Structures are given as structure tokens and as C-alpha cells.
Amino acid sequence: MKILLTNDDGINSPGLKAVEDSLAGKHEIIVVAPAEERSGFSNSLTFHGNVKIIKMDNTHYSCSGTPADCVHRTLHGIIDGFFPDIVVSGINLGPNLGTDIIYSGTAAAARQAAIMGVPGVAVSVTSHIEPFFFGKAASFLADNIETFYSNWNEYHFININVPSTPVLLHEVMITSPARRFYEEHIGHGGFEKNGTIDITLEIKKISHDDKFGTDCYAVDNGMISISPVLLQPLIDNDTGHLYKNIFSRKSHG
């Protein structure tokens, strides 16, 4: 297969190299990844201004834009003779669990691929700090890349989280994203005389619900989590009925 690799940690990330090494030889690989870290850029696309892509060699390209830009520009044919069968984003340095996928540039690259009609797979390891054990995530992806390709449909992308451990992992759980909770600290010194303010953000603690069947439950229990994530947001039916009743009364009141 022809595979486009990208990430949000930057083109020099060891996670990107690990997944490239696992897929090389059997597949045609092109890497188009951000020149610098672009974590937390979500599905941001550069609509104003230019995106600069630099050819490093015949298979590696650095991009000044976001992870979604990398996918978007590549799928619009910037590399002559190459159009991927599937897009792989990662391996991310740290988890992309639950509501993290709203912010994640890693997940966004896979989402952008699916939006444009190409299967997209995001892969992350769950450690926030070194050492990062990429071997299990890389080998799992290599063993199952054809499965993700052949079972894809236009309504979803795949988000995978693998416990960062040297221990052999066998069990896989098909999951839904959990709810994550962020304890944050905003720091600033007030407005300066010129009217500006410098604001810092520190995430002090992250917690989550651990209901059975969620991605957080899976990795907390040493399993590989695979979440088929729908592209279109869905409404909560109970809440939808609540608003329907409210505005039905207003329109007749």
C-alpha cells in the first residue's frame, strides 16, 4: 500500500521513526510532517498565508503548517505520482484519550484524511514522560494496517492508544472516548501599561471517567484501545427532545 505518515510532534520525533521503520519494506512510505511540534492545534487548517513544504529527501518532507495541513496539502497532490491508500498519524508521545481528541493534532490528521475520503489512523502511546516504548504500538499497527484499510468507511477515523510498556500486549478493546477532566492553572501578572497581558497555562492534573468500554478504561487495564470515531458530531437525544419541547411551546405560545 501507499501510506502517508504524519504526526504533531514534528518530523524528527522518535515515534514517527518507529512507525516508519515498522512499515518500511512492505509498503511505499512518504512522510509529510510538521517542521516543529504542533501539539494541540486540533483540526486547524491554514486558509490565509502560505504553507511551506521542504523536500528533505525523496520520501521525507517537512511542513510549516499543522498536522491537518500536512494531510490536506498532500491529498491535493503536492507530491507527483503519490496518493496514499491510508494515512497514519503518530506514534504520538503521550496519550490521545477521550476528549483529548478534540484538541489533538495527531487525531486531527487522521480525521482530515477521512474527511477527504482516505482512511485515517491515529496512534499514541500512553506515557507522558520518557521512556516511551514504541515497539508494541508500531508492531500492532504494522500487523493490522490492512485490516484498518479494508474495513474503513467514510464515516469514521480510527484512534488507537497503546499502553507504553515493554510487556507483551494481547488484549484489544473496541472503545468509545471517555470524558476527561482538566485541572488548570492560569498565571498572569495583570495588564501592562501598553495594554497587553502575558498569560501562562499549566495543566496540574488530568482525570477521567473509567467506565467499562471507554478508551481510558482499556489502557488503565493494560489493553490496546481502538476507537472508531465518527466524523460528524451527534446530538444527545434526550437533550434534543428537551429543546424540541421548549421551542415547540414557544412557537405556539
Image (tube, rainbow, N blue to C red):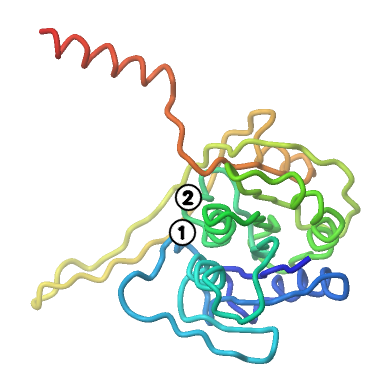
Percent position of residue 115, x then y: 52, 53
252 in relation to 107, above or below: above
Q: Classify the position of the N terminus by image quarter.
A: bottom right
The residue pinned by badge 1 equals 42
Amino acid carrying label 1: it is Ser
Residue displayed at 56% across by 83% down: 62
Please identify the quadrant where the C terminus is shown.
top left
Question: Contact, CB < 8 Å: mark 2 with mark 1?
Answer: yes
**Up-down relation of residue 57 to residue 147 (above or below):** below
- Looking at the image, residue 16 sits to the left or right of residue 65; the answer is right
How many C-alpha atoms fall within 10 Å of the one at disc 2: few (<14), some, or many (≥20)?
some
Q: Amino acid at mark 2?
A: Ile
Q: Quadrant of residue 176?
A: top right
Is 246 rendered above or below residue 79?
A: above
Asked whether, in this view, residue 194 is left or right of residue 103, the answer is: left
Q: Secondary structure at mark 2?
A: helix
Q: Nearer the viewer, residue 182 or 85?
A: 85
Residue beneath the point at 83% across and 69% down: 22
Question: How much space separates mark 2 and mark 1, taking CA atoms?
Answer: 6 Å
Image side of residue 225 versus residue 168, left or right: left
Residue for badge 2: 102
Q: Residue at x 44, y 48 (%)?
A: 183
